[in-house]
Image (cartoon, rainbow, N blue to C red):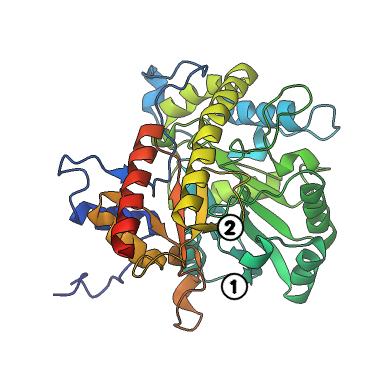
Amino acid sequence: MSEHPTAAFRTVPRTGVIFVMTEAAKHGYGTDGLPWANLGQGQPETTALPGAPERVTSVEVAVNDQEYAPVPGIWELREAVADHYNRLYRRGLPSQYSAENVCVSSGGRTALTRACAALGEINLGHFLPDYTAYEELLGIFRLFSPIPILLDPSRGYDFSLRELEREIQGRGLSALLLSNPCNPTGKVVQGDELRSWVAIARRNDCALLIDEFYSHYVWATPDADGSPPMVSAARYVEDVDRDPVILFDGLTKNWRYPGWRVAWTIGPKDVIGAMGSAGSFLDGGGSRPLQRAAIPLLSDEHTLGETRALQRVFRTKRDMMLRRLLKLGVMVDREPEGTFYVWGDVRDLPAPLNTGMGLFREALQAQVICVPGDFFDVNPGRRRADRPSRFRHHVRFSFGPPQDQLEGGLDRLQALIERTAR
């Protein structure tokens, strides 16, 4: 029997994390009572961290919260998001974001889907490797043409400003989609380099669609005033309604509330209007009670307190995972400057652990989950030739889970490697 017996429907591929979790479930994850270590986890630990603001454990539902929320989001949250960006990144600048520059959606994928649905008949550049969910997203809409741009592991995935402008002009790109910090490599475009990216986009009228969901997971030293390092292209926009910079973020990672599914897009008013129109037929809008509950979380006190706490805890986990993976023989093209992932090259491990899929399959027997690098070789519509992935020797290891789970998983990986090498 085929997977989809109804002829009208196609087989829809699973994104990387969904695939690995489905395979893990077949091996007993979640039902066998064993101490699994989910090093493939795409969410941060969500329990209280030392020194962090108190976690929200209940949400009040007002009478009018029983109604639909407006498709672009409730006005109060849109104002709060705009004010949040103005305070953190645009203090003293003449052009300020307003509620009309913000569109709220039920999760980051929904926000990106709205944006892609609103694009015209253009060439859209995207980088390799990048976030696995981009693959199906970029393939489902037929108006625009996705153009892959390969980053070189031997250069630590660097991409010069000259190369950026050459790609935009030479390939006729009208838009560029990227995650920054990058999922999976952990590379961060920041400071003067990010300022120049925004200037090149402005000069070439090329829209930057930047997924900033990991923008608080930045491992640089704190600012001179003690503020935790955070990265956003919003800092370098000159005119919020003219510069073609569209940013995506939400409560999922930076505030550690993935289950709330509250995300936002911030950008020029005409783009936000188009995304609201797209949302009216794609998803109909998000949860009104959770949008209202999100507003206090955007205060500076809460945001900075949460960011300081997560940077302390996750920096410790990052350093521990890096140290142990290197000791196990996993190479790292670039130490992560952001995110909560280590992008490891396993080619020097003993076979069959020397490919991402091989390590993934064998690790499941040891109750450890990771994500093979193949999934980050984004190939919308499977348009590129059917050949082995250029990232087949890579694995994304997550330090999103609590430290004891990470240590247990790394212990079992070490034992697996030692057994295989005998």
Residue nearest the observer in this picture, 149 or 395 = 395
Q: Residues within 10 Å of mark 1 (few under 14, many from 20)?
A: some
Give the structural element (helix, strand or loop) at label 1: strand
The N terminus sits in image quarter? bottom left
Residue nearest the observer in this picture, 26 or 109 = 26
Q: Residue at x 38, y 35 (%)?
A: 259
Q: Residue at x 82, y 35 (%)?
A: 95
Residue 412 in view (yes/no): yes
Label 1 to label 2, Cα distance in Å? 14 Å
Position of residue 40 measured from the top left corner of the image (x, y, whole percent) = 39, 50
Q: What label sits on residue 145 in the rendered view? A: 1
Question: Does the residue at mark 1 contact the one at mark 2 (Cβ under 8 Å)?
Answer: no
Q: What label sits on residue 267 in the rendered view? A: none
Question: Of the residues shown, which amino acid type is indicated by label 1?
Answer: Ser
Q: Using residue 195 as the reference point, say whether residue 353 is left or right of it.
A: left
Q: Residue at x 71, y 24 (%)?
A: 227
Q: Using residue 363 as the reference point, say whether residue 320 is left or right of it.
A: right
Position of residue 188 measured from the top left corner of the image (x, y, whole percent) = 67, 48
Q: Give the vertical position of 174 relative to 2 (above or below).
A: above
Q: What label sits on residue 118 in the rendered view? A: 2
Q: How many marks?
A: 2
Position of residue 142 measured from the top left corner of the image (x, y, whole percent) = 52, 71
Q: Using residue 22 as the reference point, say whether residue 171 is left or right of it.
A: right
